[in-house]
Amino acid sequence: MSEVTMPRLSDTMEEGELARWLKNVGDQVEKGDVIAEIETDKATMDLEAFESGVLEKQLVEEGTVVPIGQAVAVIGDGSGSSDAKPEADAPAEDAEEQKDTAAQEDTAAQEDTVAAAAESETASDELDEDDLEESEEPGQPAESGQAEAAPAASSGTGGEASAGADKLRMSPLARKLARDNEIDLDSLSGTGPDGRIIRADVEAAIEGKGAKQADSPAAPKTPAADDGDSEVIPLNRIRKVTAKRLTESQSVPHFFLTNVVDVDKLVALRADVNRGLAEQGVKVSLNDFIIKAVAIALRLHPEANASFNGDSILQHHRVNVGVAVATDAGLLVPVVTDADRKSLSEIGANVVELAGLARDGKLKLDQMSGGTFSVSNLGMFGIDEFTAMLNPPEAGILAVGAASPVPMLRDGELVEVQKMKITLTVDHRAMDGATGAAFLRDLKGILEEPLRILV
């Protein structure tokens, strides 16, 4: 009998959701059979059986988020099959958790006892607080039946405890009133006999605190989750990982370089290519041309196809271009591997396939790994220019805006020209400004003479 545990299915995965069981308790499974679907921080992945046998137990229900390494099922010879619900078979708390739970219960019980004692003491003080304060003048003997506290206070810890007691002479009721209203005990001055702090002193401090708060400017009100004006939307795993990785990206020293590209020839070439390949059902986008052009430029500038690696720089031999894809669940970056070696039509087909898998949540780990550079294109949304955040550990990402007609003087005549802004974000630890500028210059040249893309 062996346990099936939640595997690490991506480099950023810390937990996974068991989305759907594909095998039921009592089913025969073979090694390599997919027994469940796991939703990770990037996509939906298959959970395979690592040995043959009978699925005896399902330890978690569908929709349960499970940390890496925790058991989710048991495969055996069938003798231990059970139809019990997963909760009944869930692993019990380990000894440390049980110990912590017992300690918490014990602490809670002690706090209840202390609270009860304090309430009892307070109640006795409240019987006649004012009379008690007036009768406890220095030198007066304690009333019959009261314990003499002074000798006990002076023993054991010595003068330090006595000094503290002398500094803050107050009854338990005054002390409790001060603490309940968050009044600093050291800030109080007593008006009772021998400087004793009485209830009136604490009440005066409370009134003064309230007046000070009323005079201070009110803090801006944050909409409450249940005020009817806001809705709480929990982050899914993709958005959690995106937030984490982009926060890390902000810590990278980076700079931006922008260039304006004349894309008249590129737009015309794309139209010619699509007309020529229409009968074959092939259609390429401007983004496909850009991905191919980026791959060619990276081959010309291998120093831009790199990653910072602590005390070294990794210069990658393969050119794998990540393509940012927006999905309902969040941003994903599938990778077009060996983009410099693929034809334009191959890149186009690859991007369509990867984008579809990304939106359906069916990307595999190897389809999202190994990127050496990324492209983010918002031109289809009408965005003229933007800057993209780095996708660590890649040293560069290209932000592509929309191709828009602009007036321009050409050979003394005012003509309309299609222009497109591209902005390169660079990890300054791996690439200098001159290196990034040379890469962007040559990329601009390739896009403006797009026949180089087809050769």
Image (spheres, rainbow, N blue to C red):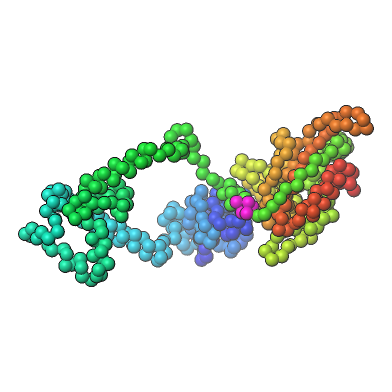
Measured from the top left, where is residue 41 in percent x and y?
59, 51
Residue 160 lies, with reference to residue 109, above or below; the image says below
Q: Is residue 208 above or below residue 254?
A: above
Q: Position of residue 51 (x, y in %)?
A: 58, 64
Looking at this view, is 76 or 315 the one in front? 315
Of residues 140 and 302, the one nearer the viewer is 140
Residue 137 location, quadrant: bottom left
Q: Main secondary structure of the magenta part?
A: helix
Tell me if residue 53 comes above or below residue 349 in the rendering: below
Res 119 seen here: no
Q: In x, y percent, where is residue 52? A: 58, 63
How many numbered marks does the figure carry? 0
Residue 165 location (% of width, % of height):
24, 61
Q: Quadrant of residue 224?
A: top left
Position of residue 396 in the picture relative to residue 232 (left or right): right
Residue located 55% across and 62% down the image = 53
Residue bounds of the magenta highlight? 247-251
Q: Is residue 15 visible?
A: yes
Q: Residue at x 52, y 65 (%)?
A: 2
